[in-house]
Amino acid sequence: MVSRCHGGCVAGPGFGCSSQRPARSQILYFILSGEVVFKTEISVLEIAKKIGYAWKELPVSEKQTYEAAAKIERQAYKEELAIYKAQLSPAQLLALKEERRQKLAKRKAMKKKRELTVLGKPKRPRTGFNIFMSEHFQEAKGISVQAKLKNLYEEWQNLSSSQKQTYQQLAEDDKIRYENEMKSWEEQMVDVGREDLIRYKNKTFQKSRVAPGKKTVGKVVSKERAKTIKKIQRTKASSPEIMAKLKTKSSEE
């Protein structure tokens, strides 16, 4: 049986938890100085901003104290983590590595989602059921969210084709809205140099945005070679020796 410790690590039966990750110098400053006080009405984001601002205004001489303390904590954490891992079997080490990979992937996905939100990426189109659910969620039967969703799904299944048609048409309209907004958004992303955010199937529109006078060397050479080959093929002087030379030149390019 596998148990999960408060630090997010994986341990088998008979093993203790590894130490929690060491605090950074800014967090140590917050803990030791008591400059920021937790309040239930203050969000975590606001607290983080307050800590960041207070740390930014702190003199370099005072920062060094907390940075040195954070360095000591990091070293102690590494030593404790090494002792902890030495107790694990190969299977448990693999489980620990896989869990870390999943956590990093989830963190990366969340970071990407936040970035896209900041950049104003349009919301994905809703399905007919999504629109039906949003309209009837408040009066749906059930106390918990799961119960409400279950009842709404059953109601949706019992609707006739004509009743569903209204919501499906709204979904089609939303799909058109999404495509139009995405096209405009992707053009803006290309303008600011973020081609990596363009959907693969629509990346071809970038080529049409290239200035007519800007041609790559490879394209120019290919057109010139094609013209030369056509010209020789039209004449009677196109001997096997000439064609062989052209093929050699083509392979060299």
Image (cartoon, rainbow, N blue to C red):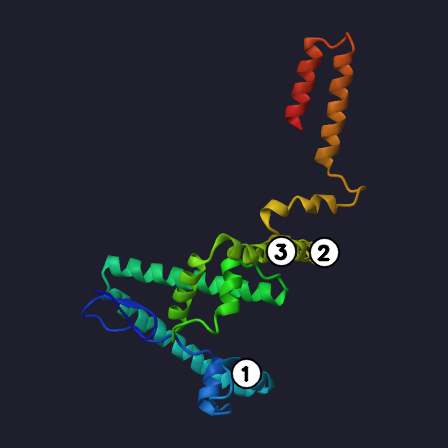
Q: Earlier along the polypeptide chain: callout 1 or callout 2?
A: 1
Q: In this picture, is 74 found above or below 93?
A: below
Q: Where is residue 50 in the image (x, y as percent from the top left)?
A: 55, 85
Q: Where is residue 187 in the image (x, y as percent from the top left)?
A: 70, 54
Residue indicated by mark 2: 191
Distance CA(mark 3)–CA(mark 2): 28 Å
Q: What residue type is labelled 3?
A: Asp
Distance CA(mark 3)–CA(mark 1): 39 Å
**Residue 113 falls in image quadrant:** bottom right
Residue indicated by mark 3: 173
Name the image quarter holding the N terminus. Answer: bottom left
Q: Position of residue 229 (x, y in %)?
A: 73, 19
Query: Badge 2: how crowded within 10 Å, few (<14), some, or many (20+)?
Result: few
Of 216 and 130, nearer the camera is 130
Dot 1 and dot 2 residues touching (CB under 8 Å): no
Q: What residue type is labelled 1?
A: Glu
Q: Which amino acid does label 2 sit on?
A: Asp
Q: In this picture, is 17 found above or below 119?
A: below
Distance CA(mark 1)–CA(mark 2): 33 Å
Dot 3 and dot 1 residues touching (CB under 8 Å): no
